[in-house]
Amino acid sequence: MAPLHMLAAAAGIARLWTDADGVEQQVSDDSLRAILAALDLPAEEPAEIMESWRRLMERAMRMPCLITVDCATPFSLPDGFDSAILLNEAGAVVERDTSRISSEGIAEPGYYQLVAGDETCTIAVAPERCRQLKGRCWGVAVQIPSLRGQGDFGDFADLARAVTSLGKAGANAVALSPVHALSIDDPGRFAPYSPSSRIALNALLGEAETSANATSDPLIDWTQAGPAKLEALRSNFDGAEDFATFLQHNARAGLDRVQQAARDAGMAVGLIADLAVGVDPAGMEAQNDPGLFLNALGIGAPPDPLGPLGQDWGLTSYSPFGLADSGFAPFIAMLRANIPTGGGIRIDHAFGLQRLWVVPRGRSARDGAYLTYPFDDLVRLVKLEAWRADAIVIAEDLGTRPLGFVDALEEAGIYGMAVLPFSRDEDGAFLPAEDYRETAVAMSATHDVATLAGWWTGRDLEWNRQLDRGGQTAEERAVDRKRLWAAIGDSLPQPADDDPAPVVDRAIAFLTQTPCPLLIVPMEDLAALVEQPNLPGTVDEHPNWRRRLPAPVDELLRREDVARRIALLNAERGA
């Protein structure tokens, strides 16, 4: 193996990868050098390769700040800790016999300190599995800004009211898009999956008295609504703190009230938060501690049939080296900031726990490569933090899955996702309900795909034609409609293309029959809306994250068609 390729492999860069068609692809040497340079491992000349190799080997020999293990499982102690004591989180000694620690493991989950003289190593002990759901229940996915209330867009106060109404209707979970902090300097920008920080909250979702009146406009004008909400928050600021601290306290208090509303409603799960895969490289988190992040690398996806040029999401994420050097502290802090107590969390693009497609800044996404992450460590930390919060974990595992990924997550008790449009066999036929995985959460749609009504009527095809995006033809969709109805129609006559209501009803009834322990239906599908919240790959061409629901949630739940669908859900998955 050439020295360059050896260095890339040691740095965790995969030179070979398999595309969506199962064809092996090879990363060019030029791309390898660019990615290595971005990781501060220059490799243009033989001398640089040797020096970068030396630094990598030196790093590998360092004692780790934190090691992760599974509870009651033997493990090797770090060098120099053959004679040490084990302290729990309260600082009490729990074991003095290191031979017993290494041969039997540590019985109880938690964070421990292994102390030998002046040396200390943190040991994160993960439970065997994440919390598992009992029985079968249902929930609703809600885009918070879409909620109708007193202001220009929905906030945590509106969400608390919606959660109460949904709980009374029988829902046991409410799934959210990320509530991470966005840039206060640009309050007119709203893209929840491009946060400034995944530790702080989106201040604009905090409650504030505003002079704005509820509007009938179906779309939010963020250039007006964002600054107006920020000004309302500023007018409520009493000056006792710094303004940024007030914003975070206000938002956190609002979110806490939502969680309390879910508990008061008797929800078995309650809030399911969403964890974005990365952050804005110019945002506060990346700028405050650049050593933790992939400073000169973007993250995205390799070329595939849906994106022949590949994707660069304009985001960055943690560097594997930065995580190790920090003892995974930022990752742990991020989990703690986002996992609702007694609720759940969904990890967006969960493949990033194992590998991320990284792209050198200024280059095409085709010039990227997969960068390996400490998968076992990250999964153990997810298990541990979810255990501490008594929360379930859902991994967004749609797309080309890395080898062994699903098996590892199932072993860890982390649920996958089974989304109706993608749940098909090799011939393209929709899977029967009984073939859905018991280890997945069933969903009728996500924020990134067409709603049931939009798919049936072909609204998504209209958008594709309007924006010259390619995709399915009308003839291909006609075939797919027959396939879908064959799976969900229960031998009834197929509805007309412009009659989506019975399709929505049958799809929901079909999904209630799956063995999945949780079924999540977006509000857009409960109300049979044709427009979807977000169209991936667009910025201003489609009104992403701007759509309002047609009425407040309590009013929608009283509509005859919505009440009929809730009755279907409760009939099979009610308490």
Image (cartoon, rainbow, N blue to C red):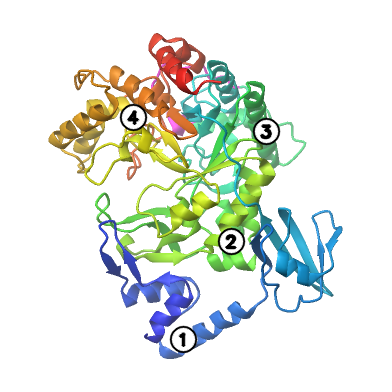
Q: Does the residue at mark 1 contact the one at mark 4 (Cβ under 8 Å)?
A: no
What range of the chain is rendered magenta? Answer: 210-225
Disc 4 marks which amino acid? Answer: Thr
**Between 262 and 75, which is closer to the camera in this rendering?**
75
Distance from the alpha carbon under mark 4 to that under mark 2:
36 Å
In the displayed structure, 367 sits above or below 503; it is: below
* Pointer 3 with pointer 2, Cβ within 8 A: no
Q: In which quarter of the image is residue 467?
A: top left
Identified by mark 1, the residue type is Glu
According to the picture, the residue beneath numbered tag 1 turns out to be: 48
Residue 133 spot, x, y in % from top left: 57, 36
Q: Which of marks 4 and 2 is nearer the N terminus?
A: 2
What residue would you read off at disc 2?
A: 377
Q: Earlier in the sequence, mark 2 or mark 1?
A: 1
Relative image position of residue 397 (x, y in whole percent): 42, 48
Q: Which amino acid type is marked by label 3? A: Asn
- Element marked by disc 2: helix
